[in-house]
Amino acid sequence: MSLNVRGALFALLAFAIYSTHDIIIKVLGGLYSPIQIVFFSVLLSFPLATVMLMRDSNAGTLIPRHPWWLGLRTIAAVLTGVSAFYAFSVLPLAQTYAIIFASPLLITILAIPVLGERVGIFRWMAVLLGLIGVMVVLRPGQTDLGLGHLAALAAAIGGSVAAIVVRKIGADERPVVMLLYPMVFNFVVMAALLPLVYEPMPIEHLGMLGIIAVFAWVAGRLIIKAYQTGEAAIIAPMQYSQIIWASIYGFLFFDESIDGPTALGAGIIILSGLVIVLRESRGGRSKNTPVLRSRSRAETGTTPRVSLFMRMAGKTPPR
């Protein structure tokens, strides 16, 4: 079995676990506010994050070198977490994934002013194609767009901003600093808002929140293993397998089915994302490879970002 095949299998397993993680969020989202779910998700993720942070042997302080950029990244991650959790709670799974899959398009656009990236005609065409796909999924004027659709779009935007900021300051800022600030800020903000929405939780629901934290950690480790094994251009597209799990889980547990426009729009968005990844992977096409370096799912501020742990370990995935 080749290294790329092994890496792809690790990634497919990781995204299957992430999709199962999202099922639990959707179940709990029908009972509790996303603020409460995010709060306990962050709280239960801290022990796992701490164990991994203990592996950072580099000397230094936790004072950021780029406080304004880090502040923007932190706010974006917190916005992404609440928005994504809410979107999963109220929208069909496949529709939520389809909208969030627009992140590579937004990262490509943001890379121009933030990173000075030069985007050629093919990537611009892919961005425009992807935006058309988003419109097909949303169907403005034909369907009632609610807070769930807005939340999914906010999650895509917030995740893209967080990813591009990591690419901007990643070479100068300590990974541990970029890991801790979003999680701590998320915890503080959700704790302040929690009294407004809190509902008592039975022990089995707390256990489900613990499972969310463990699943996110396991999936993250598998993503790291995937990028250490195979080429980024092979691993990155594996995230789109989540649409398959969304179809299966949505049908089995929530009586959901993918309608024609959602399937068509998701296909268009995925195709545009694949074009962007392939163009970035070709030498000389992209100076910063911002989408390839995003590594994994949009950051929610509830669990640490995969690419930062890879930097802490001093391991760069093959390209």
Image (spheres, rainbow, N blue to C red):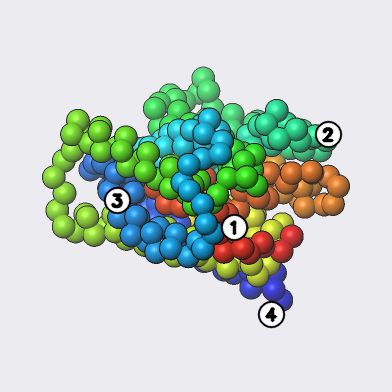
Query: In the image shown, does 133 or 77 lie closer to the viewer?
Result: 77
The x, y position of residue 2, in whole percent, is: 71, 76
Q: Point out the tag, 1 or 3, that comes first from the N-terminus.
A: 3
Residue 294 against residue 185 in the figure, above or below: below
| Numbered tag placed on residue 121 in the rendering | 2
Residue wearing tag 1: 311
- Residues at circles 2 and 1 in contact by the CB criterion of under 8 Å: no
Quarter-of-image position of residue 188: top left
Specify whether residue 215 is in view.
no
The quarter of the image holding the C terminus is bottom right
Residue plotted at (52% across, 34% down): 67
For badge 1, the amino acid type reads Arg
Q: Point out the tag, 2 or 1, that comes first from the N-terminus.
A: 2
Residue plotted at (51% across, 20% down): 141
Q: Point out the tag, 1 or 4, that comes first from the N-terminus.
A: 4
Quarter-of-image position of residue 249: bottom left
Total labels: the figure holds: 4
| Numbered tag placed on residue 43 in the rendering | 3
Residue plotted at (56% across, 36% down): 66
